[in-house]
Amino acid sequence: MLVDSHCHLDCIDLSEFDNNFDNLIQQTLDAGVEHMLCVSINLKQYPAMLEKVRNYPMISVSVGMHPMADETDDFSIDYLTQLATDEKVVAIGETGLDYYYHKDDPDWQQERFRAHINVANKVDKPVIIHTRDASDDTLDILREEGAEKCGGVIHCFTETQDFADQALEMGFMISMSGIVTFRNADALREVAKSIPDDKLLIETDSPYLAPMPHRGKQNQPAFVQHVAETLADIRGTSVEHIAEISRNNFYRLFNISV
């Protein structure tokens, strides 16, 4: 059985599921995906996201703000800490740094990133890291804020071997998405070969970044199978082994009882 360690179920267009959320979840379960982590990207939408998945035991949630979320969104350490105590919440984030559009004004992202790590350490839940064009600052802030205490995952990994090695040294897990299946992702596949079995996660980041052979279409948690297949091929093992180790790592990192 598979798990999808990072998806945005509340962002999926349900028109291809007869506009029925239950149909999406049932199709996911039928595809052999037993658990999903629905990841928060802003606090304005978080209450509706939580309500949508509240009664599904096979769905856990995180709470936090994507680094590209509107910087005017209401945010405070106290409020995030309060939300994080909900028993449905297993992680903080996604958070991190994204300099693709904001390289000239990173201060507010860095401040909010540090606050998320502060909360993660306070509530003893792992942190989900997004990083884009900000590798050095991401690693520096993780170290400066003591993120090795709460641990977490570098989600949708697209960084270098050196970045992976430094993240692993801090105890972080590395999550591979559909990008690892793309034809132009040879460098990423080389990194994916090196991730230790006990540090590897797989994800879809649905509805974004659909893997081959669905690239260009809406992604969904069922497609995590293609990520597992690619990793099995490049690591010289079976899909069943990838499913087992990523499943075990997922439940251990996010402290989910099965």
Image (tube, grey):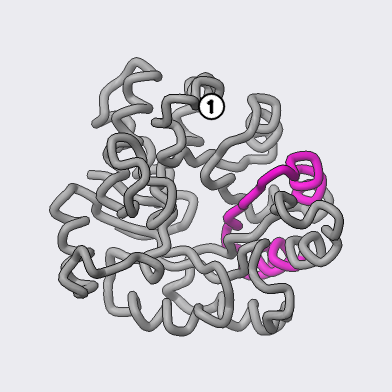
| Farthest residue, direction front | 216
The amino acid beneath tag 1 is Leu
Label 1 crowd (10 A; few <14 / some 14-19 / many >=20): some
Q: Main secondary structure of the magenta part?
A: helix
Which residue is drawn at the image coordinates 46% and 38% (left, top)? 176
Range drawn in magenta = 115-143
Which residue is drawn at the image coordinates 44% and 29% (left, top)? 197
* Placement of 147 over or under 23, stated as above or below: above
- Residue 165 in picture, x, y percent from top left: 66, 28
Which residue is drawn at the image coordinates 34% and 15% (left, top)? 236
Disc 1 is placed on an element classified as: helix
To which residue does mark 1 refer?
188
The quadrant in which the N terminus is found is top left
- Residue 58 in picture, x, y percent from top left: 28, 64
- Residue 64 in picture, x, y percent from top left: 59, 69
* Placement of 232 over or under 108, stated as above or below: above
Residue 154 position by quadrant:
top right
